[in-house]
Image: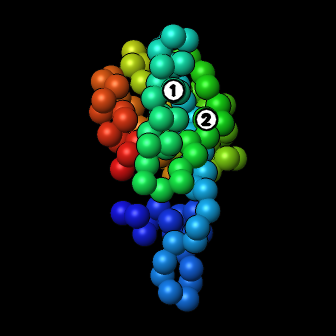
Amino acid sequence: MMTKLLGKYDLLDKNVGESVNTKIRIPVVLIADANGTLDAVREALISVGSSSKLDLVVDPVSLSTGPITTSNVRMAIDSGAAIFAFNLKGSSDPAAMSLAEKEGVEIRSHNVIYRLLDDAKE
């Protein structure tokens, strides 16, 4: 798993297969049902990075409330981010979901904060 993460962000020393000593920036698009929830999820995800054994920096490149939109997906595409959605009720924009699937954008959606954080740790 660690090799996959380091490879994704091009942090492996090609000659010896070890990690390069540098901060690992993990861009994420955060979406929640309400502003208070969004703030709590943002803080929790940032703490996941700072408590990691690696020098991770969870970088929320976009914060929004409501359903997942094409704008959210485009931001994820442009920044190389995954989308973390929390406690969303109802359906997201079908065009957004189609674009995410077509472009390979990971969408992680949860209703329980501990599951979202466990997912982020992986």
- Residue 69: image x %, image y %? 58, 27
Name the residue tied to disc 1. 43
Scheme of colours in the image:
rainbow
Q: Is residue 98 visible?
A: no
| Count of number-bearing discs | 2
> Residue sitting at 58 percent across and 71 percent down?
20
Residue for badge 2: 60
Which residue occupies the foreground of this view, 101 or 110? 110
The image shows residue 10, relative to residue 98, as above or below, that is below
In space, the residues marked 1 and 2 are separated at their CA atoms by: 10 Å
Crowding at dot 2, Cα within 10 Å, few <14 / some 14-19 / many 20+, comes out as: some
Q: Judge from the rendering whether residue 79 lies leftward or rightward of residue 108; answer left or right.
A: right
Q: Position of residue 104 (x, y in %)?
A: 51, 52
Residue at (52%, 19%) from the top-left corner?
38
Q: Is residue 72 visible?
A: yes
Q: Identify residue type, mark 2.
A: Pro
The nearer-to-camera label among 1 and 2 is 1
Instruction: State the quadrant of the N terminus.
Output: bottom left
Q: Residues within 10 Å of mark 1 (few under 14, many from 20)?
A: few
Residue 24 pos. (x, y %): 58, 56
Instruction: Assign a secondary structure to mark 1.
Output: helix
Q: Position of residue 49 (x, y in %)?
A: 49, 43
Picture quadrant where residue 89 is located: top left
Q: Is residue 121 above or below residue 41?
A: below
* Residue at the far bottom in the pictured view: 15
In-front residue for pair 101/20: 20
Numbered badge on residue 31: none
Mark 1 or mark 2: name the one nearer the start of the chain.
Answer: 1
When the figure is inspected, residue 53 is found, relative to residue 82, above or below; the finding is below
